[in-house]
Image (cartoon, rainbow, N blue to C red):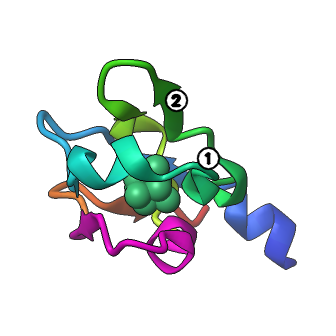
């Protein structure tokens, strides 16, 4: 089975609480907000009040935003339910 077909078998189960914590004090002064640009899943959105809002249920666990954030404002742990791989 090729990679594209295997990835299509991934199944995300969303947990009840966010596995991503963000220090929004940093986000308020972060002008470029690179997390928004590098995340392929649209997990981060600009928020006028807090600087950023996090939609953890969209996260694909790639970790790109952790490396892109210039302030180290993100804390990430693997989600409680993780990703299930279903091979048929
Ligand atoms: S890159 Fe970091 S500091 Fe900037 S908005 Fe995103 S999480 Fe906040």
Which corner quadrant holds the C terminus? bottom right
Residue 57 picture location, percent across and down: 38, 36
Q: Is residue 39 visible?
A: yes
**Residue on which disc 2 sits:** 46
Q: Which residues are magenta?
A: 63-78
Q: Is residue 1 visible?
A: no
Q: Is residue 26 magenta?
A: no
With respect to residue 87, does 49 lie above or below? above
Q: Is mark 2 within 8 Å of ligand 1?
A: yes
Q: Residue at x 69, y 60 (%)?
A: 38
Residue 18 placement, left or right of 12: left
Drawn side of residue 67 relative to residue 12, left or right: right
Q: Look at the picture and state if 3 lies above or below 79.
A: below
Label 2 and label 1: CA atoms lie apart by 8 Å
The label number, if any, that marks residue 22 in the structure image: none
Secondary-structure class at tag 1:
helix
Q: Residue at (20%, 53%) from the top-left corner?
A: 23
Could you tell me residue 81's position as x and y percent?
A: 21, 54
Q: x and y percent of residue 76 in the render? A: 26, 68
Q: Residue at x 47, y 53 (%)?
A: 30
Location of ligand 1 given as a quarter of the image: bottom left
Q: Name the element at disc 2.
A: strand
The residue lying toward the viewer, choosing from 13 and 73, is 73
- The residue where tag 1 is placed is 36
Residue drawn at (21%, 70%), measured in percent from left and top? 77
Q: Callout 1: 10 Å neighbours few (<14), some, many (20+)?
A: many
């Amino acid at each position: 089975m090729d990679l594209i077909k295997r990835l299509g078998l991934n199944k995300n189960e969303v947990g009840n609480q966010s596995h991503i914590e963000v220090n929004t004090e940093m986000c308020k002064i972060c002008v470029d907000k690179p997390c928004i640009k590098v995340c392929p899943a649209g997990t981060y959105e600009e928020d006028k009040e807090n600087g950023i809002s996090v939609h953890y249920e969209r996260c694909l666990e790639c970790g790109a935003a952790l490396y892109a954030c210039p302030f180290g404002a993100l804390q990430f742990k693997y989600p409680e339910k993780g990703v299930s791989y279903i091979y048929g």
